[in-house]
Image: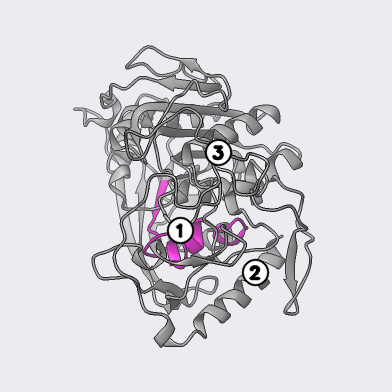
């Protein structure tokens, strides 16, 4: 699937960049939808692009989901303010009250790690050069895709005319644990969306957990994204594409620079390598381990975007990350790919991906809020853009295949809910690294 996806991506990007400038004007500012899009199929479950509204309270935007929804797998509801026991696996519902975990607060006498930062640009990259930029209305993020159109007959295939080549720069921040001896082989965790406010407590939390011997002394590598968001942008291209490309970018271009500029020695043992992200970078974290289980065994994600955000559109994986857990929601038909500019039957593995493949050695912690994203784009009524439902469906297929996972459904929580991160991050990291030796 990697080769066919790369061919298709190149072909579609070339086609988009050849669109005349007069046709590629950004649209007016349109705010996020967070409700059933106009023209959606909410009545006929057997028809294409069905959106199931069972158990959704539309008095809020996004709608509030009932964790006892019959479409969701069963979960254990915990007393408000508590988290699952250390090492527990399966599905859990946590209460609406949020208090920061004590491990996210600085403590006297706890040794502090150090950080080293550097920047890289697309001019130094082979894999992501040139970058991808989308022309939106100034001060109105995602404006050009909020009022775009789709291919006739396919509500999942977004047309983006405002995307073109450009240059990105990003910051890499490397955390070195206290007392680290440079040149010593160490486990590490790669974080997508480096610099996000959601990660403001990450290094401090590692200081405390390492001192308490709840996680191994590890290197933390926060990698900034390539810019903007969603379809037609570099961030979306990196994180929402279901292929090995982003993992290869990290392995071949980022990690060698980390070792060169900081003097660290990163382990080659996949048991000592973890990935982590939020929203689309949470999907990328899982994708890195899925396509390269020989590199990564441990994954942590907040509000992972396991929905149909992949762009350019790939006829061999029409539903993007939705097809990790579920079939494409459109009309039945063969999976196709592009060979020598011609659509031909795809050689990709069967979908949905997780049910169709032998279980991989992936340990996965993830969280989703009861008010997480719900059809934010009003022009895409494709049946594959309910973030909370996507997480519940992931939990089901992971359980069916016997994966080690812990899934938290958080009441009173929105997309990448900052109080929820502060409450759960220490216990999530401890769960993630279970079984790894701590000196």
Indicate whether 158 appears above or below 105. below
The quadrant of the rendering that contains the N terminus is bottom right
Q: Which of marks 1 and 3 is nearer the N terminus?
A: 3
In the depicted view, which residue is nearer to us: 273 or 249? 249
Name the outermost residue toward the left: 108
The residue where tag 3 is placed is 298
Q: Which of 36 and 110 is in front in this view?
A: 36
Q: Which of marks 1 and 2 is nearer the N terminus?
A: 2
The image position of residue 25, as x and y in percent, is 37, 79
* In the image, residue 401 above or below residue 341: above
**Furthest residue to the top?**
79
Most foreground residue, 263 or 99:
99
Q: Can you give x and y, in whole percent of width and height, for residue 74 in the image?
A: 56, 19
What label does residue 6 carry, if any? 2
Residue at (30, 69) in percent of width and height: 28
Q: In this view, does 261 lie to the left or right of 406?
A: left
Q: Residue at x 29, y 25 (%)?
A: 101
Dot label at residue 263: none
Instruction: Indicate the position of residue 329 as horizontal and vertical percent values.
Output: 64, 48
Q: Write down the residue under mark 1.
A: 379
- The residues colored magenta run 220-246
**In which image quadrant can residue 93 be found?**
top left
Residue located at (36% from left, 16% from top):
82
53 versus 25 height, above or below: above
Image label count: 3
Label 2 Cα neighbours within 10 Å, binned few <14 / some 14-19 / many ≥20: some
Residue 268 visible somewhere in the drawing: no
Callout 3 secondary element:
strand
Secondary structure beneath disc 1?
loop
**Disc nearest the viewer among 2 and 3:** 2
């Amino acid at each position: 699937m990697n080769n066919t996806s790369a061919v298709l991506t190149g072909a579609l990007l070339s086609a988009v960049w050849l669109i005349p400038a007069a046709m590629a004007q950004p649209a007016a500012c349109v705010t996020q939808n967070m409700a059933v899009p106009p023209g959606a199929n909410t009545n006929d479950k057997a028809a294409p692009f069905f959106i199931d509204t069972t158990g959704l309270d539309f008095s809020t935007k996004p709608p509030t989901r009932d964790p006892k929804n019959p479409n969701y797998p069963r979960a254990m509801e915990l007393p408000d303010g508590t988290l699952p026991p250390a090492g527990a696996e399966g599905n859990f519902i946590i209460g609406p009250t949020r208090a920061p975990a004590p491990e996210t607060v600085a403590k006297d006498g706890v040794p502090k790690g150090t950080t080293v930062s550097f920047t890289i640009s697309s001019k130094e990259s082979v894999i992501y050069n040139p970058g991808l930029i989308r022309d939106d209305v100034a001060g109105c993020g995602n404006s050009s895709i909020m009022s775009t159109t789709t291919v006739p007959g396919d509500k999942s295939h977004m047309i983006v005319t405002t995307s073109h080549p450009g240059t990105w720069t990003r910051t890499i921040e490397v955390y070195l644990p206290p007392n680290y001896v440079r040149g010593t082989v160490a486990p590490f965790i790669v974080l997508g969306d480096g610099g996000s406010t959601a990660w403001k407590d990450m290094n401090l939390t590692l200081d405390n957990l390492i001192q308490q011997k709840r996680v191994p002394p590890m290197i933390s590598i926060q990698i900034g994204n390539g810019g903007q968001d969603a379809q037609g942008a570099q961030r979306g291209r990196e994180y929402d594409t279901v292929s090995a490309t982003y993992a290869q970018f990290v392995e071949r271009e980022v990690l060698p620079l980390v070792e060169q500029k900081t003097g660290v020695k990163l382990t080659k043992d996949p048991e000592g390598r973890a990935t982590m992200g939020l929203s689309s970078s949470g999907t990328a974290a899982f994708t890195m381990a899925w396509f390269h289980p020989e590199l990564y065994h441990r994954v942590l994600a907040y509000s992972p975007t396991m929905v149909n955000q992949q762009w350019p559109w790939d006829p061999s994986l029409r539903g993007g990350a939705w097809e990790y857990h579920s079939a494409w929601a459109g009309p039945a038909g063969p999976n196709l790919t592009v060979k020598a500019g011609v659509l031909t039957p795809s050689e990709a593995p069967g979908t949905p991906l997780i049910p169709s493949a032998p279980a991989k050695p992936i340990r996965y912690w993830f969280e989703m809020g009861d008010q997480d994203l719900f059809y934010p784009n009003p022009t895409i009524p494709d049946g594959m853009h309910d973030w909370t439902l996507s997480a519940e469906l992931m939990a089901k297929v992971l359980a069916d295949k016997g994966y080690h996972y812990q899934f938290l459904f958080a009441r009173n929580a929105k997309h990448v809910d900052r109080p929820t991160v502060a409450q759960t991050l220490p216990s999530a990291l401890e769960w993630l690294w279970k079984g790894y030796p701590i000196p």
